[in-house]
Amino acid sequence: MAGNDRFKPVAAAALARFDAVMDILGLAGGKNAGREYLPLNPRRDDHKPGSFSIHRDKGAWLEGATGDKGGDLISLAAYVRSCSNAEAAEWLGQQLGVDVPARQPRARRDEKAVGDTPAPLAPEKPASEARKPNAGADDGVCVMPIPDEAPPAPALHPKHGKPAGRWVYVDLSGAVMFHHCRFEPAGERKQFAPLSLWRMASGRLLWKWKAPSEPRPLLGLDRLASLPAAPVVVVEGEKAHDAAALLLPDVAVVTWQGGCNAVDKADWLPLAGRVVWLWPDADEAGAKAMQKVEKRLQESGATEVQRVNLGALAMVASDADGKPELTPGEPLAAGDDAADLIDRGWRAAHLALLIDAGTLLSGVTGKTPAAIEAAPVENDAATGKDHSPRRGFRLDERGVWFVDVKEGVQAAPRWISSPLDILASVRDEHSNGWGLWVGFEDPDGRPHREIIPARTFNGEGLEASALLFDRGLKIAPRGRPLLIEYLQTANPKKRARVTNRTGWHDSDDGGAFVLPDRAFGRGGEEWIFESDSPDGNTYRQKGSLAEWKEGVARRCVGNSRLVFAVCMAFAAPLLHLVGAESGGFHLRSQSSDGKTMALRVAASVCGSERYMQRWRATANGLEALAMQYCDAPLLLDELAQLDAREAGEVAYMLANGSGKARAGRTGVMRSRSYWRLMFLSSGEIGLAQHMAEVGKQSRAGQELRLAEIPADAGKGLGLFENLHESASGADFAKAIDHATRKHYGSAWVDWLKRLVSEPAASFSSDVHGGVRAFERQFLTDAASGQARRVAGRFALVGVAGELATQWGMSGWKEGEAMKGVGACFMAWLANRGGEGNHEERVMLRQIREFLSRYGESAFTDWERPSMTDTHAPVRSDRAGWRKHDSTTDKVHYFVAYEAWRVRVCKGHDPIAMARLLLAHGFAEKGTEANRPWLVRASVPGEGRPRVVHILPEIMEADDD
């Protein structure tokens, strides 16, 4: 890789930005060992760093567990992203802003500039798309707006790295024109860099870290277009722009790129005919900049230009009894702008006090002649208040109304939509993904609560209005633009958090357990579950807890599989509280054994039969289900419906608690999905058998994450053991099925309420103590770590059932839960083959199978005919020699080491398998210190080759 000259600039830039590259590859958070960097390998199921190392100075890397390695960070990117080196170089170059030259004899110099991102050759665009380059420029034509065929914009600056802020400049229709980035290097002053798209003479589109052609569009034109009658505030700088938009939600806010020296380079024509307020920075430079802006506005035809009275902002903002207050304070510090006001606690409500008092603006500084003729009602000189009518919106029981004002006269109210309450501003747990939480009724009178993401207001807001239309909101034929304005200008005081994951969520004011339709917790902040699934809420309730205990839980007594299913449902929320790992169980049996009934019983804890899901889904679909059932029982029926090629990886994914790493549109890694799961599966086949159907071999980790329990309880009744008052298994199944349809969900609600009200510390010690007691009861001291790991999961299920009994939620006697779960654990242990190591049993089984299958065909007889016998068999695939011991009537096998490594141990570590034979006494021990499993065998006629001497005892021993 390093020898390819085309990619050397990318490799060098990647090495110079080592930490940034680790971040975009999803390798951040590793450990440093000298100049070696040790992250977790995203392509392996590692839980701690060590085997995966990357050299900070050279970029060379090695995965010691598999032998994968490379010489630079491009090959590392190819390894992580599972692509070719060329594709990795192109992608990494885009992220770092470094061009990879095209494969052509003479690449133009202007197409190799550092910081440019190339696109494939495209035909020249018409002149309307491109703007004239700056005077003297010879490096292409600036293209605005950005066309669809443009390459993704670079995520990193070649010198400054990842921007601290990125602002996207758009035109009046919302089309992207260019980017402006802010960088905050450690120990240095802030830096700014515009990023624009250019078409070269060859037709290629390149991103360049340079200003676009003049005149440059303003920031905020999309909002300007959406508020055609609102005043326009001009501030200096993007950070001040964002702050002013928060403080003045009912007006349009714009700024220009480039600071005070670039005022004349901006396009001010969109402000023609508008009332403009100038908000300068509180210093001499800010005043001079706004003088230039004022001149350009008058030339562009602005109706009226006023200045913000900076003296009126010399106040202290506070709240008294929930109401905003302003008290006299110190004058603004030099350079203060809108962002500094927010840092000092100002909100929109505080600035509204100044607007209502008529003190925010210092007066008209300039008017066009047409504006003087059509001057509106002036402020009352005595009071300083504006007595003219105001435009705006009104909400009543009949709907949303818009009141317009024309020439100082208030027009008749105009109906916009059916009633639409704006309940709260929402954001996710990381304070991203802002939006509005709204409430309304559909034509059937059914109430709706919907999240309107702020991103849906982009452009003309069609996505937002379409969502409301689809949910049943009535909107006037020409009311959509005003409805969007009504939503965008809203500033609700209430705040709420949004999540797309159920379960436990931590926040500053206390944790909460979130369900699709409610949240339980001690915190004061409201949590809202948001899902794209049309059937997102399967947590339903019918009947009381007492009815569920009598109809469902009572019939589970004496039936270990049913008791286990109920306890598993109660155990799911405990994973987070006691720090346990995720995992699953699989009930396997032939059809009509009642295994699906166990899932229905578990589902009745949380909801109706619709709570139960199916394996019939893609890996991505199951990832979405995991988010919807985080910290809750996930019930999956019919394993055979899952694609056998994905089965093993899906088992890993669900139990490991995280989804796939995915790249966004720009190639930067998107946030992964995370969850905690306790899941119960059923099927006529197990995981290993399902994978074997497509020639795959299950690994121990996969089977441990999905512990397989025989559904047949061994009483001749399939899943059942105690039929209670029923005459037959079929009658009992009908009775319990009928009960689960009548009574469900109440146990889950009461269980969560109790968990939220009880400090985890009050029962976590009992849980951990119960787990240890379970292991002592059901495992010996010789049990492997694998068996103990699964035993811990079973134990948590049993302890959860006993805790539910203690809290009066099962109706069972003490010990019933642990008895049923213990029976299921012993069934798992017997089905597994004991408490030993799974991999060791698999290895020994593979050796026996090889000897049984190829003992005659691949091994030459020790006492074979002499080399002079022309009828001696010729073995082209010989693995070694077999020797019959006449005194014991047993066969010894001498396996050539190469055949041992490649054929006998296929899929496993040959050294580990050889050591396993020695440990069990199944191989002769040699004299070599480093390779004691090899011996010298005196083979008649073939010298003394090194072989693995397998003793006859291996064929007589059990897997254990």
Image: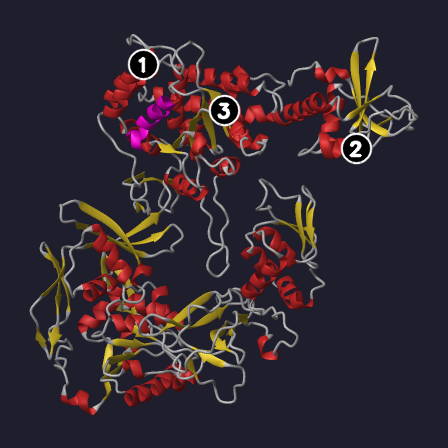
Which one is earlier in the sequence, the residue at label 3 or at label 1? 3
Residue 622 placement (x, y as % from top left): 42, 40
Q: Residues within 10 Å of mark 2 (few under 14, many from 20)?
A: few
Task: Please tell me in which quadrant of the rendered image residue 117 appears.
Answer: bottom right
Q: Secondary structure at mark 2?
A: loop
Residue 451 placement (x, y as % from top left): 28, 52
The residue stretch that appears in magenta: 596-610
Mark linked to residue 730: 1
Q: Is residue 493 something that shows in the picture?
A: no
Q: Is residue 527 above or below residue 874?
A: below
Q: Identify the residue under disc 3.
A: 708
Give the alpha-carbon distance from disc 3 to disc 1, as whole Å. Answer: 25 Å
Which one is earlier in the sequence, the residue at label 2 or at label 1? 1
Mark linked to residue 106: none
The amino acid pointed to by label 2 is Ser
Which one is earlier in the sequence, the residue at label 2 or at label 3? 3
Q: Is residue 845 above or below residue 31?
A: above
Tag 2 and tag 3, C-beta contact below 8 Å: no
Q: Identify the residue under disc 2.
A: 876
